[in-house]
Amino acid sequence: MIDTANLDRSAIEQVVRSILTQRMGGQQGANIPEDKPNPLVVNISARHIHLTQEHVEILFGKGKTLTEMKPLYQDGYYAAEETLSIVGPRRRMLPNVRVLGPCRDDSQVELAFTDGISLGIDLPVRISGDVKDTPGCILMGPAGVVELKQGVIRAMRHVHMGPADLEYYGVQNGDKMKLRVESPGCTTVLEDVVVRAGNGIKLEVHIDTDEGNCLNLDAASKVELLKMEPCSCKTH
């Protein structure tokens, strides 16, 4: 009999692991899971716009800066009060598209696949920030208009991770993972979820509105990240 009354948490965990190991035939490392360092959060990233400070002033007025409306899950990032209209090559328009802050070095528009169809833009799937040789659009604000020569993308599904999360899942920046979502009558696995690593980052998966609707994410009962194993198939 083990007296657990005076044991601290770590000691109790060691006792439990020892018992589990014995019951599993003495196998060391028999897939007994460690506690996750951070909870897994999956968020839908709706259509939005990132702007340079120069473009903020053209679109909203000289000397204007973005006004924070609501903080986002990642510290230091926010949804701004400012919105813009996006005009595509078919002269169709998406009104009231939210601007996110803070400002960036390059302006960028992130849309879902169906948004691209509506605007007549063939959206390339890119990691945010990779805008070279991408389509452009026209941004219309209350004080002016900006014609983007490039910067319109469909953001590749991705997961933000800090160092502890990278270690837990056994992945590195740029690796690809799978997101498994259980929802009523709709258990689905999304592959090619790109790892985006950084210090001071919270564990968070970003998918777009089309993907969120496909997964029935609002009704999900379980979400999990799985490491993608290298393909073992042979080509001839």
Image (tube, rainbow, N blue to C red):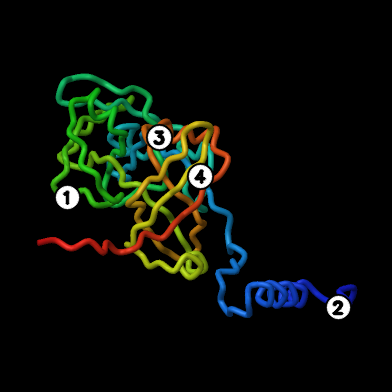
* Mark 2, residue position: 2
Within the image, what quadrant is residue 23 found in? bottom right
Looking at the image, tell me whether mark 3 or mark 2 is earlier in sequence order: 2
The quadrant of the image that shows the N terminus is bottom right
Q: Kindly identify the amino acid type of the residue bearing the numbered disc 3.
A: Ala
> Which element type, helix, strand or loop, lies under badge 1?
loop
Frontmost of labels 1 and 3 is 3
Report crowding for label 3: few under 14, some 14 to 19, many 20 or more residues within 10 A (C-alpha): some
Q: Residue at x 50, y 40 (%)?
A: 68
The quadrant of the image that shows the C terminus is bottom left
| Label pair 2/1, CB-CB below 8 angstroms | no
* Mark 1, residue position: 132
Q: Residue at x 24, y 23 (%)?
A: 118
Alpha-carbon distance for marks 2 and 4? 47 Å
Q: Which mark is residue 171?
A: none
Q: Is residue 171 left or right of residue 28?
A: left
Looking at the image, tell me whether mark 1 or mark 4 is earlier in sequence order: 4
Report crowding for label 4: few under 14, some 14 to 19, many 20 or more residues within 10 A (C-alpha): few
Q: Is residue 65 visible?
A: no
Looking at the image, tell me whether mark 2 or mark 1 is earlier in sequence order: 2
Q: Is residue 154 visible?
A: yes
* Mark 4, residue position: 72
Looking at the image, tell me whether mark 3 or mark 4 is earlier in sequence order: 3
* Mark 3, residue position: 46
Q: Is residue 161 left or right of residue 105?
A: right
Alpha-carbon distance for marks 3 and 2? 53 Å
Residue 105 percent across, percent down from the top left: 29, 52
Looking at the image, tell me whether mark 1 or mark 3 is earlier in sequence order: 3
Residue 29 percent across, percent down from the top left: 56, 76
Residue 200 percent across, percent down from the top left: 50, 63
Frontmost of labels 3 and 4 is 3
Q: Is residue 174 left or right of residue 214?
A: left
